[in-house]
């Protein structure tokens, strides 16, 4: 059953344009968005030649040049003093030596534990490993954590939400369990192992002496020589009953500078040119895996990147033929999304156009495939829509109106829930606009077996469906760029930090 808001139906006349020619123009330029173009661009961007477009690496630089040349060919402006590149530096941090020994047990990095903290130590440290379990006031009153490595049983929690309180209580470091099951831990350990030679990318910051080691629930049981069920119970009620262990550990750190760049192109508007609509995607991916296989990232997010290219081409052609948008449009392809939304964070902290003049962000991240939820569905013409009604009462209605009028997709809002366990809202670049109270829509096709695998390749893309999705985003962008009033910010940001 197609999901249509009854509100959208009532508001069609209110939001419809007064001049039919504008609708006709939108249809005309939407027709320039074709499966053939999308396939051509994506075949290049997701080729082995791009080496997985890893942030700061050769393939990412090649992709950036390709995008800049494309936008220049459209006659769009480079908005950074004439350049299409917003250049900045990231810091690559690696830990060439990490050791953790508990009692007589010597643990292997990225096998028995994963180092997720930050530290740089000239010599190994010796102390006790104590069991705290839950990080609450009651347990902290029962267990002396000062100068100790502290065992946390934080199943279902995120490390960054429970670590600060324990470190502030004087802990020297933390050994933490955040997930049940050895298989889940092993998958994460293998992923960290595949990245270990590259370092962790981020913005430069001072070293925090916070050695934090992630282990499986089975390993925590082994370290304290106590069954898992007893540890679970002790974590809640009597953590002091678990005997402490002797431990020594060391972390050595290396840092290097990694230059990278966002790519952007600008189309100036007419009478409302000071107001800017941002249409974004990330063009980076995860590079080459530990077995030497290229992670092509055709869907993630080659699909979103070429969708932005096609939308830019449609708007550029419209402007060339006398249909310039009223508001300005920034076509933004960001780097470093796979490393923690770094490129969009940099842009939102160093905007080329004032954030108060940025009316909306339409973010496109994975729009080329069919996910688990729809793989067996009779009707697969869907797109997930996330964040559209949080900050503005109008944005969701505008998107639904354009869908009803032009594309008739299933708009699925299941991942827009604040308690979505996947946390998709927090996992793409719209987040760094929404946190500044800019109304956003995140367009997404969901995950599939090839997500973050070397098998995410062009031949698996559903180009006719991707074309329809891209046309919906174009029509919504056309509406937002040309309507009389910008979408009001009349809602509140109810979603906290990542």
Image (cartoon, rainbow, N blue to C red):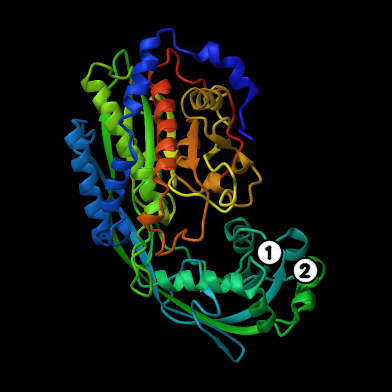
The residue that label 2 is drawn on is 142
Residue, x 19% and y 38% (percent of image)?
83
Image quadrant assignment for residue 365 = top left
Q: Mark yes or no: residue 293 visible.
A: yes
Residue at x 21% of width, y 34% of height = 78
Secondary structure of the residue carrying tag 1 is loop
Q: Residue 344: where, in percent of width, then height?
A: 39, 43
- The numbered dot on residue 155 is 1
Circle 2: element type: helix
- Foreground residue, 93 or 5? 5
Q: Note whether 18 is above or below 486 in the view shown.
A: above
Q: Quadrant of the N terminus?
A: top right
Where on the picture, by quarter, is residue 352?
A: top left
Figure disc tally? 2
User: What is the spatial separation of the Cα atoms under label 1 and label 2, in whole angstroms?
Assistant: 20 Å
Q: Is residue 443 left or right of residue 285?
A: right
């Amino acid at each position: 059953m197609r999901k249509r808001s009854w509100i959208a139906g009532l508001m069609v006349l209110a939001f419809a344009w007064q001049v039919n020619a504008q609708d006709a123009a939108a249809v005309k330029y939407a027709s320039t968005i074709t499966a053939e173009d999308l396939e051509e661009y994506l075949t290049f961007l997701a080729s082995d030649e791009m080496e997985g477009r890893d942030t700061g690496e050769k393939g990412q630089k090649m992709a950036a040049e390709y995008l800049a040349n494309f936008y220049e060919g459209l006659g769009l402006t480079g908005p950074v003093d004439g350049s299409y590149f917003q250049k900045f530096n990231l810091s690559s941090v690696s830990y060439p030596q990490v050791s953790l020994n508990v009692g007589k047990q010597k643990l292997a990095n990225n096998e028995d534990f994963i180092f997720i903290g930050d530290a740089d130590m000239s010599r190994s440290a010796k102390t006790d490993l104590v069991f705290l379990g839950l990080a609450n006031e009651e347990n902290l009153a029962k267990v002396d954590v000062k100068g100790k490595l502290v065992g946390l049983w934080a199943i279902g929690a995120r490390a960054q939400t429970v670590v600060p309180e324990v470190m502030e209580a004087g802990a020297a470091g933390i050994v933490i369990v955040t997930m049940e099951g050895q298989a889940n831990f092993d998958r994460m350990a293998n992923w960290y192992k595949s990245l270990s030679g590259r370092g962790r990318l981020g913005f430069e910051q001072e070293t925090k002496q916070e050695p934090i080691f992630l282990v499986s629930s089975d390993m925590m049981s082994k370290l304290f020589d106590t069954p898992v069920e007893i540890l679970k119970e002790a974590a809640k009620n009597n953590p002091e009953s678990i005997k402490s262990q002797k431990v020594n550990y060391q972390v050595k750190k290396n840092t290097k500078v990694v230059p990278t760049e966002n790519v952007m192109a600008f189309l100036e508007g007419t009478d409302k040119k000071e107001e800017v609509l941002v249409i974004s995607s990330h063009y980076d991916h995860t590079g080459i895996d530990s077995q030497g296989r290229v992670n092509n990232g055709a869907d993630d997010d080659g699909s979103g990147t070429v969708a932005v290219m096609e939308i830019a081409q449609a708007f550029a052609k419209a402007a060339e033929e006398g249909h310039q948008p009223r508001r300005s449009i920034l076509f933004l392809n960001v780097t470093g999304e796979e490393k923690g939304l770094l490129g969009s964070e940099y842009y939102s902290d160093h905007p080329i156009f004032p954030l108060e003049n940025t009316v909306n962000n339409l973010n496109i991240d994975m729009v080329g495939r069919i996910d688990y939820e729809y793989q067996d569905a009779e009707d697969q013409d869907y797109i997930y829509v996330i964040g559209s009604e949080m900050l503005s009462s109008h944005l969701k209605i505008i998107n639904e109106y354009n869908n009803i009028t032009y594309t008739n997709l299933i708009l699925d809002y299941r991942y827009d829930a604040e308690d979505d366990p996947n946390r998709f809202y927090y996992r793409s670049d719209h987040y760094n606009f929404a946190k500044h109270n800019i109304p956003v829509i995140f367009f997404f096709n969901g995950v599939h077996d090839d997500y973050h695998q070397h098998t995410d390749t062009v031949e698996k893309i559903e180009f006719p469906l991707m074309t329809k999705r891209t046309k919906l985003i174009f029509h919504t962008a056309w509406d937002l760029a040309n309507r009389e009033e910008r979408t009001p910010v009349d809602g509140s940001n109810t979603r906290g930090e990542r």
